[in-house]
């Protein structure tokens, strides 16, 4: 007994119609026509669509559509049914003490790592330095001047190479001697890692 593919192929050849021509006349892709003729079911759409193809091809090739569909129904392979061995059993998530412990360890490690990274970045960056007095361009009428400002509490501060005291809040102050030739005040804050921040204030010495 002939298969649906053989029936369509023989009728097409008998009418001397190529697959390309049949595609043009039926609007069915020649790849689908070839798949039906060669019984390559895996290259075809769903079964209801294939039924429509077969009816259209049969009508165009003067084959009884109902007979063609009957042969297709016989030839078309059944779909493999997926069988669930335990259809009523579902995996349920449960929070166990082990999972709590692992989660706690991960969070602790992340917190410690974040803290260490922040501390390292703070350690290698230059210290902040704000010089509040003297202001840039200030006129000085005596041979000593008070320099003060703020920096990091752990930084060392030098004013014109003279050390300044830094308190626990980062405030520093130093009274230095100058001369008539002094043109600027240089304040240097140095961190424990050796990074420096410099601020220079221009001054004009105008003795009375």
Image (cartoon, rainbow, N blue to C red):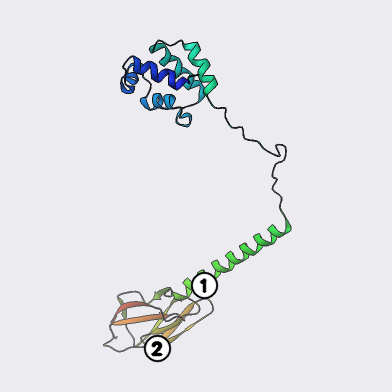
Q: Is residue 31 above or below residue 71?
A: below
Q: Does 173 appear above or below 42?
A: below
Give percent across and percent down for residue 47.
Answer: 51, 23
Name the secondary structure under disc 2: strand
Does label 1 or label 2 sit earlier along the sequence? Answer: 1
Asked if residue 109 is positioned above or below residue 35 in the image, the reply reads below
Q: Is residue 151 visible?
A: no
The residue that disc 1 covers is 119
Q: Which mark is residue 109?
A: none
Q: In terms of secondary structure, where does tag 1 sit?
A: helix
Where is residue 109? Give x, y as percent.
60, 66
Marks 1 and 2, how far apart at CA: 29 Å
Labelled pair 1, 2 in contact (Cβ < 8 Å): no
- Front one among 52 and 14: 14
Label 2 neighbourhood size at 10 Å, few (<14), some (14-19), many (20+)?
some
Between 2 and 80, the residue placed more toward the observer is 2
Q: Residue furthest left?
A: 181
At 54% from the left and 20% from the top, the residue drawn is 73
Q: Quadrant of the C terminus?
A: bottom left
Could you say which disc has been placed on residue 162 in the image?
A: 2
Relative image position of residue 5 (x, y in whole percent): 44, 22
Toward which corner of the image does residue 116 lie, by quadrant?
A: bottom right
User: What residue do we see at 58% from left, 64% from top?
Assistant: 110
Residue 160 appears at what percent x and percent y? 35, 86
From the viewer's side, name the closer residue of 71 and 22: 71
Total count of labels = 2
| Of marks 1 and 2, the one in the foreground | 1
Q: Residue furthest front?
A: 1
Q: Is residue 85 visible?
A: yes
Left or right: 24 in relation to 105: left
């Amino acid at each position: 007994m002939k298969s649906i593919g053989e029936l369509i192929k023989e009728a097409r050849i008998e009418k001397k119609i190529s697959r390309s021509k049949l595609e043009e006349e039926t609007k069915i892709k020649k790849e689908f026509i070839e798949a039906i003729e060669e019984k390559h079911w895996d290259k075809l759409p769903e079964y209801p669509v294939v039924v429509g193809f077969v009816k259209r091809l049969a009508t165009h090739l003067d084959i009884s559509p109902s007979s063609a569909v009957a042969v297709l129904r016989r030839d078309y392979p059944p779909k493999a049914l997926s069988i669930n061995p335990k259809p009523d059993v579902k995996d349920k998530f449960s929070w166990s003490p082990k999972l709590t412990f692992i989660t706690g360890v991960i969070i602790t490690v992340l917190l410690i790592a974040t803290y260490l990274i922040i501390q390292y970045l703070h350690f290698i960056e230059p210290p902040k330095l704000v010089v509040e007095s003297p202001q840039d361009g200030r006129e000085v009428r005596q041979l000593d001047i008070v320099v003060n400002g703020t920096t990091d509490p752990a930084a060392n501060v030098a004013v014109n190479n003279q050390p300044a005291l830094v308190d626990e809040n980062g405030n520093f102050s130093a009274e230095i001697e100058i001369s008539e030739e002094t043109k600027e005040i240089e304040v240097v804050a140095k961190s424990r890692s050796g990074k420096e921040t410099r601020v220079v204030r221009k001054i004009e010495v105008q003795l009375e």
